[in-house]
Amino acid sequence: TDSKENDKLSLWSDAVQQLSKEVQSWPYDFLQSQDYFPPNQRGAVFGRLLVQDRYFKGGRFQCTNAYLGLALPGDAGSWQRESKGYQFWTQANAKGYFKINNVVPGDYNLYGWVPGFIGDYKYNGTITITPGGIINLNSLVYNPPRNGPTIWEIGIPDRLASEFHVPDPYPSLMNKLYVEQRKDKLVQNS
């Protein structure tokens, strides 16, 4: 037990020494890099996103809890495959209002998706963030793609698979041929 106690004390001593080195080296050099933008050099975007689906609630505007983000310019949904640029995301409140803070200056597209509605939203235009700039986009409207009213649907278009969870069967109703436990408890459709 003596050697284990010495190891613990040695680790603690090393951690205290490393802490001292880190405190002395603060502020880190990366904060002085031209690629780091301090908070007062970043911008913000705010507005409101409403959904208008002519086949849902008579086509009235719906408030949303949409997810909205700024990413490199591209097609609707391209933000999902983008890995080179900055992305800044937020969730709108129940009335559709959103604000994206601390955005690094540059050119972006505004993208979004709305739980319960199919498709991807894209603001029609490029948003240029300037150091310290604040952009008000006012009210935006998303018209989900439709060919007609929904007759039936499997699942909810919310980018979650929770409604496809397979529960454990009742032991008295279980087929003995399929006793093997499955690792994945979600329905897999191909």
Image (tube, rainbow, N blue to C red):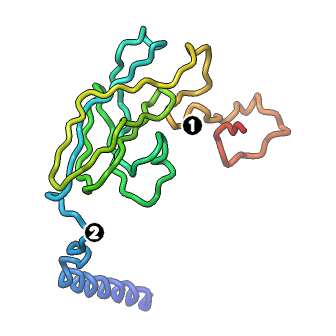
Q: Which residue is mark 1?
A: 161
Place residue 12 in its image quadrant. Answer: bottom left
Name, please, the residue furthest toward the top. 58
Q: Secondary structure at mark 2?
A: loop
Horizontal and vertical percent position of residue 51: 38, 23
Measure the alpha-carbon separation of dots 1 and 2: 38 Å
Q: Is residue 91 above or below residue 21?
A: above
Q: Which residue is mark 2?
A: 35
For the C terminus, the image quarter is top right
Mark 1 / mark 2, whichever is N-terminal: 2
Q: Is residue 139 above or below residue 160?
A: above
> What's under tag 2, amino acid-wise?
Asp
For the N terminus, the image quarter is bottom left
Question: In the picture provided, is 168 more to the left or to the right than 109?
Answer: right
Of the residues tagged 1 and 2, which is closer to the observer?
2
Name, please, the residue furthest toward the front. 125
